[in-house]
Amino acid sequence: MVTMKDVARRAGFSVATVSAVVNNVPIVSPEAKRKILKAIEELQYRPNHIARSLKGSKTRSIAVLVRDITNPFYPGMVFGLEDYCWKHHYQVILANTENDPQRENMHIDELISRRVDAVVIGTALTNRNPYYDKLREHGIPYLFINRRPPQLHPNEYYVGANNKLAGEIAVRHLYVRGYRSIAFITGPAEYSTSLERYDGFISGMRKLRLPVEDSWVLKGDNTMDAGYDLTLRLIRSGQRPEALFCSNDLMAFGAYLALAEIGLEVPRDIALMGIDNNPNGLLIGLTSVDIRNYDMGRAAGELIVRWLEKGQGPDKTVSRLRPRLVERRSVRANAGTEPEICEWSGVGQVPIVKRSQTV
Amino acid sequence: MVTMKDVARRAGFSVATVSAVVNNVPIVSPEAKRKILKAIEELQYRPNHIARSLKGSKTRSIAVLVRDITNPFYPGMVFGLEDYCWKHHYQVILANTENDPQRENMHIDELISRRVDAVVIGTALTNRNPYYDKLREHGIPYLFINRRPPQLHPNEYYVGANNKLAGEIAVRHLYVRGYRSIAFITGPAEYSTSLERYDGFISGMRKLRLPVEDSWVLKGDNTMDAGYDLTLRLIRSGQRPEALFCSNDLMAFGAYLALAEIGLEVPRDIALMGIDNNPNGLLIGLTSVDIRNYDMGRAAGELIVRWLEKGQGPDKTVSRLRPRLVERRSVRANAGTEPEICEWSGVGQVPIVKRSQTV
DNA sequence: TTGAAAGCGCTAACAG
DNA sequence: CTGTTAGCGCTTTCAA
């Protein structure tokens, strides 16, 4: 590997001068600069980022912890993050934890060792992993994304969707379209997102004075299988809600399959909604609520990079993106009943917002 | 940040001894080891990986270049790669190029600067990016994955699917099920994968003595939109093949939507197949050919890690995984005609293979 | 405007 | 068994 020394020797200057040229410090004579640039080109010199990191103790790398990049929610988020970070010359290190705390901890140790500048945590559970503290103890900024732990300690920040609003938007949409009896399949209670969406479902129902049947609230685990099984069980037990709302699109996919198997047509016989706006919802015309994962990743990138450059955390500890309704065909244009309540702050029309917002 | 020196001072030993303990060099007295371990624990010392890298000029990091992690093909592949690499203490750096050569080149410069140990290139076009040579010039091993450039230079390796076979398997499957007139939508000619699948389609048809209608071979670009548009155009022009085979699942998804719009039911009116085994194919029951992206990423990890440890490249320059037929519902159980040709080496029954194979 | 030299945290060769 | 020390390639004073 060719080093600065090689360049210096070739150009007839010292390493200090070469360093100045490489870093665009404008104190070098044009003559020297020319010669040095020439030597760099000839030798195909590339600065050694490692040495630089060692000196400056900044690696310009950001790690992102996700459960499993294969989960359709993450790629968009990671893309947004990578996009922003890369444009600001930060690299993104990807770490899949597979929901295994031990694996997560090993990753964290490794990341500390590698002195990443920051980490974006997409794996937080309601039962908080105490290992995150190690990060703080070592002075590594970190940011929770999408899922948040129950409490945010000092210097902890969160960016995610307004999941409660997402739930409300869905219920509201069904209501406006004339649906009154709505069943709900939740996600696992260990994810804040599930809890918030559940809250949104409940509060939406209450605001609209719609009854919540206990037996119509099913506990799923966010997988397609769960959506399938629970829907089958619900319908086979003789229940027949007008609409079925799932906490995420994957479960809605499963529900769709189950309904098809039973012979129920969406939306003719029953309406279906999900949350996440999985692009493949297009295949079955699933109406969903977009929680904008690309923007979320991007927002995380912005927050973290600014933090790193300014040396201090964001102003707000919690940032939330406003969800958007994505209408496709799984909810009928109008199910008959006329809507009774029409004004409802901020939900009627969901504006398209570009930047992250704080609740 | 606490350093080795701090640990040494606290434990009352020299840095060399601490280093020995940290690296498990078995020449340290149990007594010293105990004290040092204690100091490490108390101070929460973590070795500085940067310093280590600088010394040993190995970063234990592997970069992966993909077009866009959002493309449903990649996450599985990247997951396989990350999984394997991480288990061997290599980190994975993710770089999205968005098919922009300039962005790719900047990434490559950056990766050289950062002295990644190796790079896995998932972005090769038939029109080769000359910038890959920089990597070789700098002594950084790299491996093409999934897509391959037309020629492999010395020290260049490739791992991917046997795409030609995938095409043949699909045609063969349709044939066995009684379909005789088959239309095909190709992917872009800049990807080796498209070309190979096209070859597979043609050779499959020839082997089965099926006619290839020129007007039934459409040029797509691997997007859902292309599948949709081309299918609409094909059918609306009055053509009516018994089966439609798409070079990838995304286009098959688009085709499905178009057929539904026209009022053609799959598989009753027309059979549909794709390649890739996108998990969401489940939603429409799409029969596909799995090219095993997880295994592909994993195989790349194996190849690269072994290369790095042994210091020399793989034995074979090309490794290909054997595709697998994934039957769902988009091809009828039997379309009427009895199969005439049944023996066909290696295609009749597609075995499930765990490890990568060389063609 | 340029150069000499210290030092980032670690490893490894060598000495004790 | 343990300590001293010379770098790894770079940035950054400080002097010239």
Image (spheres, coloured by chain):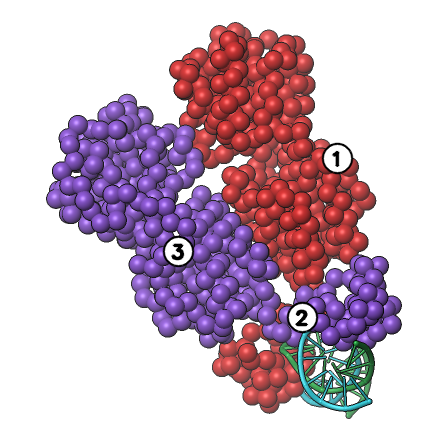
Chain colours: A purple, B red, C green, D cyan
Q: Quadrant of residue B7?
A: bottom right
- Are the residues under marks 3 and 2 on the same chain? yes
Q: Which residue bears the numbered disc 2?
A: A52
- Who is closer to the viewer here, A3 or B173? A3
Task: Give left or right: position of A270 versus B222.
Answer: left
Q: CB of mark 1 within 8 Å of CB of mark 3?
A: no
Quarter of the image for residue C7 reads bottom right
Which chain hosts label 2? A
Residue B26 lies left or right of residue A167; in this view the side is right
Q: Which residue is mark 3?
A: A356
Residue located at (81% from left, 75% from top): A14
**Which residue occupies 56% across, 44% down?**
B68
* Disc assigned to residue B150: 1
Q: Compared to A268, does A153 lie above or below?
A: below
Identify the secondary structure beneath mark 2. helix
Q: CA distance from mark 3 to mark 2?
A: 33 Å
For the point 68% across and 65% down, the residue is A49
Query: Which chain is mark 3 on?
Result: A
Residue A20: x and y, percent? 73, 72
The three-letter amino acid code for the residue at tag 3 is: Ser
Q: Tally the marks.
A: 3
Q: What's the amino acid at mark 2?
A: Arg
Dot 3 surroundings within 10 Å: few (below 14), some, or many (20 or more)?
many
Identify the residue at horizontal 26%, vertical 49% (top origin).
A346
Numbered disc in front, either 3 or 2: 3
Quarter containing the C terminus of chain A: bottom left
